[in-house]
Image (cartoon, rainbow, N blue to C red):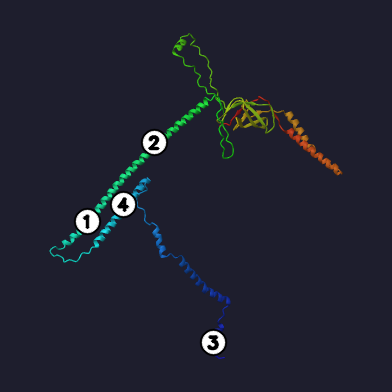
Amino acid sequence: MTTNEKQNKRPEAGKKELTPRQIQMRKKMVVFPLFFLAFAGCMWLIFSPGEKEREEPSAGFNTELPTPESEGILSDKRDAYVQEEMRRREREKMRSLQDFAFGMEDEEEEPVMPAAVPDKSSGPAGGSSGAFRTSRAAYADINRQLGSFYEDTAGETGEEREMQARIEELERRLEEQQAQKTAQEEQVALLEKSYEIAARYMNGGQAPEAPRQKASVSGKASVQPVRQVRRNIVSLLAAPLPDSVFAREFVKPRNWGFNTVGSDLREPERNSIRAAVQQTVTLTDGGEVTFRLLEPMMAGELLIPSGTPVTGAARINGERLTVKGSAVQHGGAVVPVDLSVYDTNGNEGIPVPGSEELNAVKEIAANMGAGMGSSITITDDAGSQLLSDLGRSAIQGVSQYVSKKMRSVKVTLKAGYSVLLLPPLQ
């Protein structure tokens, strides 16, 4: 091998061959930029605005700023309609004037005069006279059109005044009808009120109609206020005497220095209603007791006469029996109320004093009954064992019943026991 061939093979031996992975990476470095450029070009072609799209936003968007000289919003819609109609007619007239002026110009341009030999004697004055006549005729036509325009506007103003007068007349009639209707309603309301007052004081003691109970949103009946019935005393003064009788009685001898001790005949204010136990009853905790009203009362707008029964639920708290009345029934109407029972001393509830010795005996008996049947008996015979279990279960049931009965507190209320029914304080 020669020296030149060895020198040519040295660079080839020094050059490294590329692996398939490196070749793939170089291909990617060439292809990916081409893909990105193609993608960017497509996106630009898709989302780039055209010439029409650039012009459209300016057509629909008002870029001018509002000036302070512009008119504001009218307060009356009718005036706005009238002004808009006048503007429309003015635009139509101006459009007709412009069309007429354009027609005049066309007529002037249509005739073509033959070329004539100019008269040197007349000079340029002859040509200017024709143009002057034409302009004067056009000026006269424009003045005539403007005059008719103002005449029509004056006529329209008269029509508007007539329409305004008619509208005012109709408004005046409507106000008169409303005033008359209001006066009639007030008279009817006054008559109804007078009839109501007359029926209240002159119905012969009959109870007014029971008010209808309104259903509440929460599902609970609304409690009616309860108050005492007061007698309306019209007058305690004697009837007026004629002058002759007064003079005859006045001259009679009498002791003018003696002052008779008088009493205040006004009925004192009371916030309670007197009642009594209707019948003798034995109560336990949670039982019901019935009272009988000893005087009439008002439940809302319903008059409850005396003798009406009122039922309440009893609760035993120590040595006091508290009773709460929740409803009153009269004449087929059930009126929800809230009444608390007080004794004649003004204390809430009814006193039920108990005996310490009796309570101790009851407690001992209850404990003895509770302890019965607690022993365990074991026998070899299955039958005997079963009988003993059954007997023990029966004894335990009876003992528990006896213990419960012995521990329960019983209160006996006698018929005619006086109490006071008090509504909740406002």
Q: Secondary structure at mark 2?
A: helix
90 relative to 331, above or below = below
Q: Which residue is mark 1?
A: 137
Q: Which residue is mark 4?
A: 90
> Separation of disc 2 and disc 1 at Cα?
59 Å
Q: Is residue 354 left or right of residue 239?
A: right
Give the mark nearest the N terminus, 3 or 2: 3
Point out residue 131 in the picture as x, y percentages from the top left corner. Answer: 20, 60
Give the mark nearest the N terminus, 2 or 1: 1
Give the mark nearest the N terminus, 3 or 4: 3
Q: Are marks 4 and 1 in contact (CB under 8 Å)?
A: no
What crowding class fits label 4: few (fewer than 14 Cα within 10 Å), some (14-19), or many (20 or more)? some
Viewer-proximal residue among 229 and 30 = 229
The residue shown at (53%, 89%) is 4
Q: Which residue is mark 2?
A: 176
The residue shown at (35%, 46%) is 79
Q: Is residue 365 left or right of residue 379?
A: left
